[in-house]
Amino acid sequence: MASITIRDMSVSYNKKKTYVIKDLSLDIKDGEFCVFLGPSGCGKSTAMHCIAGLLHPASGEIRFDDEVMTFVGDKGKNKTFVPPQERNIAMVFQEYALYPNMSVRENMSFALKTKKIPKAEIDRRVDYMAEMLSIEPLLERRPAELSGGQRQRVALGRALVRDPQVFLLDEPLGNLDAKLREQVRYELKKIQEQLGITTIYVTHDQTEAMTMADRIVLLKDGLIMQQGSPNELYNHPADEFVASFLGTPQINIFSCDVRQENGWLVLDGGAFRIRAPQSAQASLKAYAGRKVNLGIRPSDFELVQEGADAIPVQVDSIEPLGDAYLIYVRIGRKVAVVKYAGETAPAEKELLLEPNPAKLHLFDPDTRKRIND
Ligand code: ADP
Ligand code: MG
């Protein structure tokens, strides 16, 4: 196991200095489950390939513990580069290829045999990992005799028996159906915890990131937008992009005028007006007379009969989720979505909704950065 340190890493696929990763610095702790999250094309796989040693960055440094894996100094000088096979990493991709003519046991043993590890030790490791992954009954089967989920488990097992110090997974569950994905997700996380293996997991799926990560690194256009625990990013998004990327349905964003009323700052959204919470008064001062973007998550509204900060809405449509309802509403001309956890859906066409004042997110409309603490 190892910690991973990345310093000022920039990566380009051409020599024209168009960087797909720009000055990325990151510290991943020993044993941490770190998720690279972001939209397609933001540089997740590129960053991972550099850590694996499949790609040379244009500049920067990567260390596993104190050992330098990659170093490229200014103007490409003083290079150090440990080749992938000497980094003691294991990788699993969405398109994992098992050897079709080998049994599951042979598939899982293959890399260990080439390393000349004694047979008894190979069997011990394969049996242990097969038990962890609940694939013991499948050990003598060929890949063609397995379901997609079973094959994916074999691919994970084949990587893990090598006892790598770093485990790299690039959208490994993409081929599985939703139910199976949930199950493998849970098992993968459990095994990672038991083995304590430093893991980087690439996904564009915010649910996978929220459920599995110790730390999420949210990327956009090759830059880290925010990193932290799932709760930190969800409850305290550093900007509007992070706020919108995490959470489903997406956070509602309202453009509001900031006004003074009797010495108190209020947010005027046209069709509604709410007092800014005490905790936001100081940081909002600079915005008096200007606009801010107000973010409210669908689950942060309460249905009320009356209230000074209640927002009047018209119900457009209601979707039952089983344990809750999604209520699509109009607030003036704007459409918003509310997650309502009541037993039955409200029958009225007009409702009053009160946002939880402790859960308002305020963003600068120009920089999109968070304003309130
Ligand atoms: P992600 O994994 O987040 O979807 P990638 O790391 O694959 O994103 O890609 C980041 C950017 O680099 C994208 O703009 C992509 O088009 C570009 N890119 C990826 N691989 C190559 C390549 N082999 N050659 C040129 N450009 C590439
Ligand atoms: Mg990718």
Image: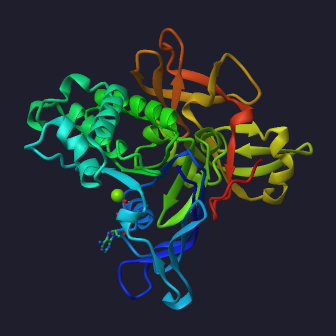
Residue for point 44% across, 85% down: 17
Q: Quadrant of residue 225?
A: bottom right
Figure label count: 0
The answer to whether 51 is drawn above or below residue 115 in the figure is below
Taking the image as drawn, is residue 335 in sight? Answer: no
Q: Quadrant of residue 108?
A: top left
- Left or right: 42 in relation to 113: right
Where ligand 2 lies, by image quadrant?
A: bottom left
Residue furthest out toward the right: 263
- Pick the residue in front: 198 or 260: 198
Pinpoint residue 147: horizontal percent, then vertical percent.
16, 30
Residue for point 33% across, 46% down: 159
Pinpoint residue 54: horizontal percent, then vertical percent.
35, 68
Residue for point 40% across, 68% down: 53
Residue furthest out toward the top: 343
Taking the image as drawn, is residue 5 in sight? Answer: yes
- Pick the residue in front: 114 or 175: 114
Question: What kind of colouring is applied to the model shown?
Answer: rainbow
- Pick the residue in front: 246 or 175: 175
The answer to whether 327 is drawn above or below residue 101 in the figure is above
- Left or right: 266 in relation to 364: right
Pinpoint residue 207: horizontal percent, then vertical percent.
45, 37
- Left or right: 181 in relation to 207: left
The answer to whether 96 is drawn above or below residue 151 in the figure is below
Residue for point 42% across, 23% down: 318
Q: Quadrant of residue 366?
A: bottom right
Pinpoint residue 192: horizontal percent, then vertical percent.
47, 37
